[in-house]
Image (cartoon, rainbow, N blue to C red):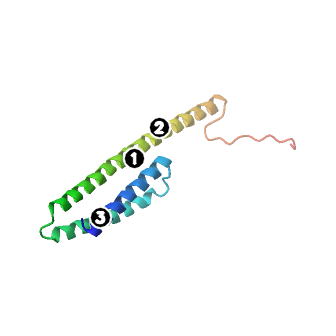
Amino acid sequence: MQEELRQGFERFAALQAAHRQALCEGRLAECLLWRGQREIAFRQLQQGFVKLGRVAGVPADELAAVQQALGLLLEGERQLAQAVRARQEEIAKQQCAMRRGKQLLGKLGAAQGGSRGAMPRVLSNRA
């Protein structure tokens, strides 16, 4: 396999692992940067494929190695997509629980005679 293509596969696999680890640990602050990182990695892979396509008579074993590496990357993408779905479900459950809590707090305030959004009354011994 050509060196540039092999390095592209390795970089992309490392990127997948880092993103999957960040998802599992809940480190989502940097997820907005992931798209740019992944686009760069895809472009590097694409350039490697273009160069490989220009080479006439690529040996069958080299093509098989490329197919195997690509299969591993696709499996990594499936795992990453599964981790993303799991995290989305977890966040949706948290949002639902927060909405329920907010509704209960609103009902509790109304049941105690307060109006929604009213400021708490402060009692002072100076008056």
Q: Residue furthest left?
A: 57
Is any atom of residue 43 visible in this view?
Answer: no
Type of the residue with mark 1:
Val
Q: Quadrant of residue 120?
A: top right
Horizontal relation, residue 31 to residue 55: left or right: right
Residue to which mark 3 is pinned:
6
Q: Is residue 111 left or right of residue 28?
A: right
* Marks 1 and 2, the one that precedes in the sequence: 1
Q: Looking at the image, do the residues carrying marks 1 and 2 touch, with CB atoms under 8 Å apart?
A: no
Figure quadrant of residue 10 = bottom left
Q: For numbered disc 1, what is the local secondary structure?
A: helix
Q: Amino acid at mark 2?
A: Lys
Residue 84 is marked as 1
Camera-side mark, 1 or 2: 1
**Disc 3 to disc 1, C-alpha distance:** 27 Å
> For mark 2, does the 10 Å Cα neighbourhood hold few (<14), some (14 to 19), or many (20 or more) residues?
few
Identify the residue shown where x is 35% and y is 57%.
Answer: 13
> x%, y% of residue 21?
45, 51
Residue 110: horizontal and vertical position, in percent?
62, 31
Q: Earlier in the sequence, mark 3 or mark 1?
A: 3
Q: In the figure, 18 relative to 51: above or below?
A: above
Please state if 1 lies on the left or on the right of 7 as rendered. left
Q: Earlier in the sequence, mark 2 or mark 3?
A: 3
The CA span between labels 2 and 3 is 41 Å
